[in-house]
């Protein structure tokens, strides 16, 4: 097991290096550097332009800039944002809990609804339930997030007034210092009446919007995995033994069907972060998605590089964990 | 009562019951467009950042709320020496800095030291705060302050003398700009001693109508009323900026009552105007979009040709189709909200036949090939330069001119224009300080140099003489007359075709009272209230 773990962990090193390089180069391929983007109609004197470039290290050859960047990263320093002069890591850590909280609730929704729905569809294969569910899941999967979000805001938030339309908390009635960055927890810690409920209400629409695609994927994956498992000999044996249906499906079939589903859930983390960019924009959710987009617009190289590196690191770690989990669940993979 | 209103009423009742006394605090929520770079206006470059620091700070001079008129601020009055090179500012006494922000409690009132600190930080590279937070003072440099200032000296605790290298009356308007706001020198010392200089730009301490409370990046900024404010006091207890970059989300929040004021997208305005719970105001922006003719390149060296081109373009269609109505055709370089605007100038009509005749008279043979440069980016004064370029191209074809559309990456585009490589080019300007000089310098002879801002490379001696005279005259009436005469010269000589001033909208809840939209695009909340 240790060998397997080490091998997997070592494999992440070249991935990181490649990532570092690609991020570094990609942002520099976009026309305009942080200084040019900052300059408006006023223009800038050549001396000041040279000074700005020098301060940011942009006057050095690209390979040297890359070298400095790698050395800096190895020292655990992600640099300072050009726009705000704040450390990139500090900015990331302020915003990341919001994205994590939203992602968690979206995944929770997707799993809690997707798993049973997919399982039931498999058991009731070919019935109206199965057909409606699969139709819905295709719709959910192919629906543009932006449109779906606006639709929900328009009806649920604006017309019916059931939920707030954006943000994380009612800014007029609730004010407390962020302690963890997770609004639901902070609201709870604040002890203010109704704060937790309000924070949860603010989560409803964004979690639905962000959770829709993973929900559709999980439901479909569960259904097909279940269908495969239901045809297996051991399920037939379990049935022949006269076990009750819930035990056959819930324990014997479901447990084995879950293996590919767990992988899919892990893979959704990357997709979730991509979806978060749009969801955060629509709902004014102060997370890292919005921050990254802004950093691109400002050509804020350090913020963008640092942000992408941190997110990639997380996706890599999650995938590594999934691999390990997979190894635990299925010993054949470990020894392969 | 709808379901929603019933719920609101219930919530209000519960709130009122839980807070036995006094009445619930009044909170004004402004849906702002983005996070500030930081809270020191001297370091910032965006309107969003200035909006975030404005509640906290005051300047020596101020713009009267809702106008471009300069009025006394922290300086109660000023005396300009006869040679125009020395200005003595007499400072207001008894002005308190905010107390309790970031653990700082001021021990003295505002005085000359704060003025000197605020300017020297931006001006002197050896100043202890010069390099803090990146130390880029764009506006101080853009407004030419390093060249203009000779010295700033303290005459006594309540008098500061600005000595200039040349007489310049626009200085008073410059000082009303956000970059020239006054921060607390005592607070700077307090942080320096604690080894936390960078917090100076994160936790602002000023003398403004609101005191800074808290900021969460991309989420919210909170301020509380400054009861000790010397000027027009805030009428609400708390001011909240709900950071909402997406225009659709801002509209939703406004409709849902989650904020009371925001900047709408022009496309949303018609729907907003139909909603009785909202009020929309509009003003021409402090900007101009123009099409510059390079007068150093034939045939644009001939006045008739420039006039012909000015008549060849259907401006009304551009306003309708590209600005979607959110703009007004421009005939002068300055917008109509600015003092000295000459409304007597009559714009060139859209008249292709006359344009053609004028071209023939100037000896230009058609078909004529020209290039037409358009900006690769959207600007506040020009929503779509490419589309405008295409429309112009079609209009020009009608008078026998083949226009080739050209563009470059934005930085490159500006550079090449300033070098004068173009024949004709779309460009524009956004005003800084509400002073006409801040627009007309674009047509100064000095700015025709390579790398200068005069993109028509047009140097008219009569115009330039008046420009210089207006810059040093202290009597506003004299200045107004000079600028109005300059607009006539400029119109006749047509160094460029004025396209439009974009319209800036503000949307607010109908309950908001006392808000005055600023032609400078500033958001200011002292004096603003919410009706019950």
Image (cartoon, coloured by chain):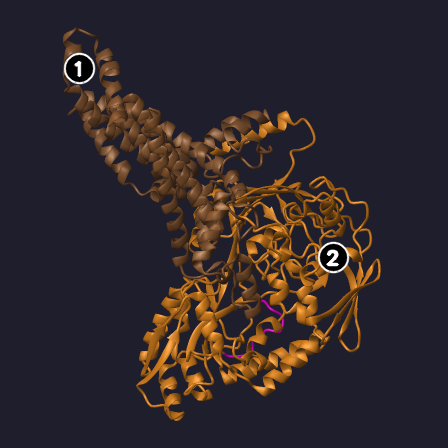
Q: Which residue is mark 2?
A: B117
Indicate the secondary structure of the residue bearing disc 2.
helix
Circle 1: is it few (<14), some (14-19), or many (20+) Cα within 10 Å? some
Q: Which mark is residue A198?
A: none
Extreme residue in the top direction: A242
* Residue B219 appears in view: no
- Note whether B182 is above or below B244 in the view shown: below
- Note whether B428 is above or below B101 in the view shown: below
Q: Is residue B5 magenta?
A: no
User: In the image, is A238 to the left or to the right of B323?
Assistant: left
Q: Which mark is residue A235?
A: 1
- Note whether B455 is above or below B9 in the view shown: below
* Residue B108 appears in view: yes
Indicate the secondary structure of the residue bearing disc 1.
helix
Circle 2: is it few (<14), some (14-19), or many (20+) Cα within 10 Å? many
User: In the image, is B399 to the left or to the right of A175?
Assistant: left
Between A18 and A79, the one nearer to me in the picture: A18
- Please tell me if label 2 and label 1 are on a single chain: no
**Letter of the orange chain:** B
Cα separation, mark 2 vs mark 1, equals 81 Å
Between B530 and A109, the one nearer to me in the picture: A109
Q: Chain of mark 2?
A: B
Image quadrant containing the C terminus of chain A: top left
Chain A colour as displayed: brown
Q: Hey, which quadrant is residue A232 in on the image?
A: top left
Between B154 and A6, the one nearer to me in the picture: A6
- Residue B183 image offset from top left, x and y in percent: 71, 53
- Residue B49 image offset from top left, x and y in percent: 58, 53
Q: Hey, which quadrant is residue A177 in on the image?
A: top right
Q: Which residues are magenta?
A: B336-346
Extreme residue in the right direction: B156
């Amino acid at each position: 097991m240790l060998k397997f773990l080490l091998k997997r962990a070592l494999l992440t090193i070249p991935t990181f290096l490649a990532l570092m390089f690609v991020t570094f180069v990609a942002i520099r391929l976009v026309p305009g550097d942080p200084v040019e983007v900052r300059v408006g109609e006023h223009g800038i004197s050549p001396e000041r332009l040279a000074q700005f470039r020098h301060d940011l290290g942009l006057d050095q050859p690209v390979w040297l800039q890359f070298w400095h960047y790698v050395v800096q990263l190895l020292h655990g320093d992600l640099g300072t944002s050009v726009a705000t002069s704040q450390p990139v890591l500090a900015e990331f850590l302020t915003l990341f809990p919001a994205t994590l909280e939203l992602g968690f609730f979206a995944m929770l929704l997707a799993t809690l609804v997707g798993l049973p729905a997919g399982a039931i569809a498999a058991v009731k294969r070919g019935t109206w339930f199965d057909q409606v569910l699969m139709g819905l899941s295709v719709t959910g999967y192919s629906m543009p997030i932006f449109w779906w979000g606006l639709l929900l805001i328009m009806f649920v938030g604006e017309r019916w007034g059931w939920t707030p339309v954006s943000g994380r908390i009612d800014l007029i009635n609730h004010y407390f210092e962020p302690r963890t960055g997770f609004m639901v927890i902070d609201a709870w810690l604040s002890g203010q009446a109704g704060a937790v409920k309000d924070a949860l209400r603010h989560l409803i629409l964004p979690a639905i919007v962000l959770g829709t695609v993973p929900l559709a994927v999980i439901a479909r994956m569960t259904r097909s995995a279940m269908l495969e498992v239901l045809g297996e000999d051991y399920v037939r044996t379990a049935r022949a033994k006269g076990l009750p249906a819930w035990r056959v499906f819930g324990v014997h079939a479901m447990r084995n069907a879950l293996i590919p589903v767990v992988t899919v859930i892990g893979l959704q983390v990357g997709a979730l972060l991509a979806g978060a960019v749009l969801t955060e924009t629509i709902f004014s959710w102060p997370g890292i998605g919005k921050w990254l987009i802004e950093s691109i617009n400002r050509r804020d190289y350090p913020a963008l590089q640092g942000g992408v590196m941190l997110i990639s690191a997380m996706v890599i770690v999650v995938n590594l964990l999934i691999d390990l989990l997979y190894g635990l669940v299925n010993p054949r993979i470990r020894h392969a | 009562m709808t379901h929603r209103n019933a719920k609101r009423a219930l919530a209000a009742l519960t709130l009122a019951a839980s807070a036995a006394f006094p009445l619930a605090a009044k909170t004004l929520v402004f849906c702002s467009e983005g996070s500030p770079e930081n809270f020191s206006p001297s370091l910032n470059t965006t309107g969003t950042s200035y909006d975030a620091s404005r509640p906290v700070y005051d300047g020596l001079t101020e713009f009267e709320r809702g106008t471009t008129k300069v009025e006394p601020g922290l300086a109660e009055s000023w005396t300009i020496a006869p040679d125009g090179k020395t200005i003595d500012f007499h400072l207001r006494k008894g002005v308190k800095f905010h107390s309790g922000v970031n653990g700082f409690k001021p021990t003295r009132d505002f005085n000359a030291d704060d003025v000197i600190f605020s300017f020297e930080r931006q001006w002197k590279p050896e100043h202890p705060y010069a390099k803090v937070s990146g130390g880029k003072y764009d506006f101080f440099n853009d407004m030419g302050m390093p060249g203009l200032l000779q010295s700033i000296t303290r005459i006594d605790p309540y008098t500061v003398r600005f000595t200039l290298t040349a007489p310049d009356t626009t200085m008073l308007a410059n000082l009303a700009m956000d970059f020239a706001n006054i921060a607390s020198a005592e607070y700077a010392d307090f942080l320096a001693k604690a080894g936390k200089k960078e917090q100076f730009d994160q936790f602002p301490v000023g003398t403004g109508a609101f005191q800074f409370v808290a900021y969460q990046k991309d989420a919210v900024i909170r301020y509380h009323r400054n009861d000790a404010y010397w000027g027009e006091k805030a009428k609400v207890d708390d001011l909240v900026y709900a950071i909402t970059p997406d225009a659709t989300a801002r509209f939703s929040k406004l409709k849902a009552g989650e904020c009371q004021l925001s900047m709408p997208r022009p496309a949303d305005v018609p729907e907003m105007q139909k909603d009785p719970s909202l009020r929309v105001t509009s003003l021409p922006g402090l900007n101009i979009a123009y099409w510059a003719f390079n007068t150093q390149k034939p045939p644009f060296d001939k006045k008739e040709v420039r006039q012909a081109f000015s008549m060849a373009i259907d401006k009304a269609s551009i306003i309708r189709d590209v600005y979607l109505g959110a703009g007004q055709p421009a005939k002068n370089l300055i917008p109509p909200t600015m003092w000295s605007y000459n409304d007597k100038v009559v714009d060139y009509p859209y008249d292709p036949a006359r344009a053609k005749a004028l071209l023939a008279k100037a000896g230009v043979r058609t078909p004529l090939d020209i290039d037409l440069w358009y900006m690769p980016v959207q600007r506040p004064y020009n929503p779509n330069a490419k589309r405008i370029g295409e429309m112009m191209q079609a209009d020009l074809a009608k008078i026998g001119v083949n226009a080739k559309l050209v563009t470059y990456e934005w930085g490159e585009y500006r550079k090449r224009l300033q070098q004068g490589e173009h024949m004709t080019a779309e460009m524009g300007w956004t005003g800084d300080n509400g002073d006409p000089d801040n627009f007309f310098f674009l047509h100064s002879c000095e700015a025709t140099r390579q790398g200068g801002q005069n993109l028509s490379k047009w140097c008219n001696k009569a115009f330039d003489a008046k420009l210089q005279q207006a810059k040093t005259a202290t009597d506003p009436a004299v200045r107004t007359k000079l600028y109005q005469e300059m607009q006539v010269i400029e119109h006749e000589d047509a160094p460029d075709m004025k396209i439009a001033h974009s319209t800036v909208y503000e949307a607010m809840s109908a309950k908001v009272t006392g808000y005055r939209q600023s032609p400078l695009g500033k958001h200011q909340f002292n004096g603003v209230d919410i009706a019950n």
